[in-house]
Amino acid sequence: MASASAPKCNSHTSDNEPVQSTSQDGVNCDPSEAVPRLPGETLITDKEVIYICPFNGPIKGRVYITNYRLYLRSLETDMRNLRFALKQEGHSRRDMFEILTKYAFPLAHSLPLFAFLNEEKFNVDGWMVYNPVEEYRRQGLPNHQWRITFINKCYELCETYPALLVVPYRASDDDLRRVAAFRSRNRIPVLSWIHPENKMVIVRCSQPLVGMSGKRNKDDEKYLDVIRETNRQISKLTIYDARPSVNAVANKATGGGYESDDAYHNAELFFLDIHNIHVMRESLKKVKDIVYPNVEESHWLSSLESTHWLEHIKLVLTGAIQVADKVSSGKSSVLVHCSDGWDRTAQLTSLAMLMLDSFYRSIEGFEILVQKEWISFGHKFASRIGHGDKNHADADRSPIFLQFVDCVWQMSKQFPTAFEFNERFLITILDHLYSCRFGTFLLNCESAREKQKVAERTVSLWSLINSNKEKFKNPFYTKEINRVLYPVASMRHLELWVNYYIRWNPRIKQQQPNAVEQRYMELLALRDDYIKRLEELQLASSSKVPSTSTSPSSPSQMVPHLQTHF
């Protein structure tokens, strides 16, 4: 369930106009309404309360509970850590608590997530953004070395993989079935990305099922050789195991493991020392503890260091840089895995692809990257986020996708002109990762979404974003086709994302928008206004002049060479 205090609405009305405005998340704000609601959102109950604010003490207000959010109307706006006091008569506290619990954790009460009730309409269908065939075709696939297979169209080979996979041309479907038996969760090595020039590839999978006895599988060994041989320029396939080596060895006790030198003669194995989901969860908890409700200025740097959050960001970025560099340099094709191939593996492949391929730095390109490497390849969003589930102590919860977006933000700070999207775009994605307003991040894998008919029954987050792209654009974006980005993964160049992690603490001054960026946006708006006026004048003048065969047919054709220095 989302929570909100009374939003500030931007209104531009005259005395004769009806008062209607829009909040920052696109909700229509009508002052005559007790609480602004989305289409499909219904009010369940409301009570007068005293909000126990950790910053300003008791504050009077009224709390509204809908089937989507808890909404507090009062004079204060910065309220996220909610603690209320209610009058005792009528046992209203128990009623309020039971209703809040019911709609905050709908799955525990046999209720649908709000995304299945949301009736919002947009002029763009975000579910149409990602088409795997079109995306692989953009990469130049299939070709003589790689083919598209539909062996998994009914999710029989691997329940957590997408229906469409790209595999070596020389590997038959029977070969794939034999390899699947030796890979954790049947997540076989499949292609994620191919370099447009040197044809090196990024391949992803899960760990081999070696076990304590050191089992070998000739089909798996041969398959990795076939992957290596798709490019005749290389003698060895590079394998990046995202885990610390001690963890990979420990996984042998549960039947997992890694590719040993004696079994995989034509491969080189490197461990990237990225810790597991439990370590990341505890690290983020420590970040929360140092930023809310109090920030201790005198020990800020040591407190931040003690969370190890930026250290984890550094290790993820460092690993992705190694993957990208190996492929870009033409030294080797790369295979990436962790344990099951749906957490750290997704971080590494998607970040490496973002560094290598400028297409993914556009708004729609980034949406496709998320749909492809995270959503379709089975990152367990439902388990990692816990949508609608009351079990906060669930050991499967972990901020893996948040960590990926944080890495993207770090890159955008180091390369301010390389990304079409701005910070608001990334924050909006993270807000709706948790909100359950859209179907984009629901459930754990593609097969589960098809069973639930998520694309038919819910709205895509990309519908919201792509229907108002200007709000999410970086004004300094400069499109570059073949530029590879190598961020500096040094602690000196990484910083805590204040505008995300500390935005609800009123004692911390938010990072103000760049003054140059603001002026640039003003000039762009001024330019657009002048162009519009010019076209109107030319349209008016053309209607007075008899048309000739040489006359332009539209105002836009009259100004083909119109330029601006803005």
Image (tube, rainbow, N blue to C red):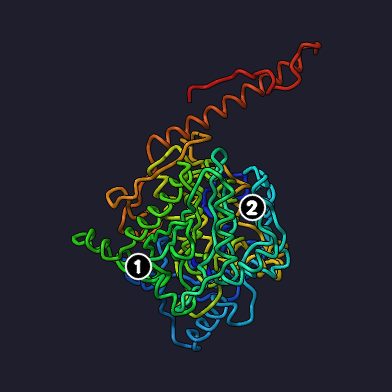
Q: Nearer the viewer, residue 440 or 246?
A: 246
Q: Residue at x 64, y 78 (%)?
A: 111
How many angstroms separate mark 2 from mark 1 (CA)?
33 Å
Query: Which of the two residues, 191 or 557, is positioned nearer the viewer here?
Result: 191
Amino acid at dot 2: Ser
State the image coordinates of residue 45 (x, y, percent, origin top left): 57, 76
Q: Is residue 185 left or right of residue 413?
A: right
At 69% from the left edge and 20% from the top edge, which residue is drawn? 557
Q: Position of residue 284 (x, y in %)?
A: 37, 66
Nearest-to-viewer mark from 2 and 1: 1
**Circle 1 residues within 10 Å: few <14, some 14–19, many ≥20:** many
Residue 33 visible:
no
Q: 370 or 153: nearer the eye?
A: 153
Spot the residue most to the left. 298
Q: Position of residue 361 (x, y in %)?
A: 52, 43
Query: Residue at the location (53% across, 35% down)?
Result: 481
Whether residue 17 is situated above or below residue 52 in the rendered picture:
above
Answer with mark 2 or mark 1, whichever residue precedes in sequence: 1
Apparent side of residue 307 relative to residue 540 in the rendered image (left or right): left
Secondary structure beneath label 1? helix
What label does residue 463 carry, if any?
2
Q: Position of residue 474 (x, y in %)?
A: 48, 40
Residue displayed at 55% across by 55% down: 203
Identify the residue under disc 1.
283
Instruction: Indicate the amino acid at tag 1.
Output: Ser
Relative to residue 321, is residue 152 depicted above or below? below
The number of discs equals 2
